[in-house]
Image (spheres, rainbow, N blue to C red):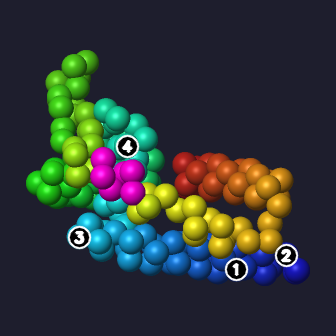
Amino acid sequence: MAKENRTQTLKRCFGEIYKQGKMLDDSRAKHYNLTGTQVRYIEIIGDNPGISQDAVARLEGVDKGTVARAVKKLEVEQYIYRKRNKEDIRAWCLYLDRRGEEVYNSKVCKNEDYEAKLFRGFKDNEIDTLVDLMDRLTDNIETIKKKG
């Protein structure tokens, strides 16, 4: 492949992976009257009980306001609850409520079937290599963003 086509090919591949993953997440989340993004936040909170909204925003690469709006809706719908951070009373710690636990433990948060289809024909070591390369690429993108 010509060097000048690499970036375009990567953009196309990333776009397709993102688009298909988002469509799958949204379709699965409909059962709970949630969006795929809200389910992702439930997954993050379930994996990291007591996480702050700021940390969720950093993990997802979105602004704090976006997370705050989603968290408020999830709290009103009783998927999550907040508790004051004992070390910093200005901050809130996020935890899953009963409904959030139900979503977190459901197939909605488990993408095994999607992963099996996505990586069909790949050997485990090839997937590991791909993930390592993507991590390096993401690190490079972060460096570019910081330096401008």
The residue lying furthest to the left in this view is 76
Q: Residues within 10 Å of mark 3 (few under 14, many from 20)?
A: few
Q: Is residue 27 above or below residue 40?
A: below
| Pointer 1 or 4: first along the chain | 1
The residue to which callout 4 is attached is 46
Q: What crowding class fits label 2: few (fewer than 14 Cα within 10 Å), some (14-19), or many (20 or more)?
A: few
Taking the magenta stretch, the answer to whether it contains residue 103 is: yes
Residues in magenta, as a range: 101-106
Residue 139 location (% of width, % of height): 65, 49
Q: CA distance from mark 2 to mark 1?
A: 10 Å
**Furthest residue in direction top, as rendered:** 87
Q: Residue at x 27, y 39 (%)?
A: 95
Lower position in the chain sequence, tag 4 or tag 3: 3
Residue 58, position in %: x, y?
42, 46
In the rendered image, residue 21, in percent from the top left (x then y), is placed at 51, 72
N-term-proximal mark, 1 vs 3: 1
Q: Residue placed at 64% from the left, 80% from the top?
A: 12
List the residue tagged with mark 3.
Answer: 33
Q: Dot 2: what SS?
A: helix
Q: Amino acid at mark 3?
A: Asn
Q: Nearer the viewer, residue 129 or 1?
A: 129
Which kind of residue does numbered mark 1 sit on?
Gln
Q: Tell me the mark number nearer the camera, choosing from 4 and 2.
A: 4
Q: Which tag, 4 or 2, sits closer to the chain's start?
A: 2
Q: Amino acid at mark 4?
A: Gly
Q: Is residue 80 in view?
A: yes
Q: What mark, if any, has residue 8 been given in the picture?
A: 1
- For label 3, the SS is loop
Q: Which badge, 2 or 1, is on the more N-terminal residue? A: 2
Which image quarter is the N terminus in?
bottom right
Q: Which is more foreground, mark 1 or mark 4? A: 4
Q: Which mark is residue 3?
A: 2
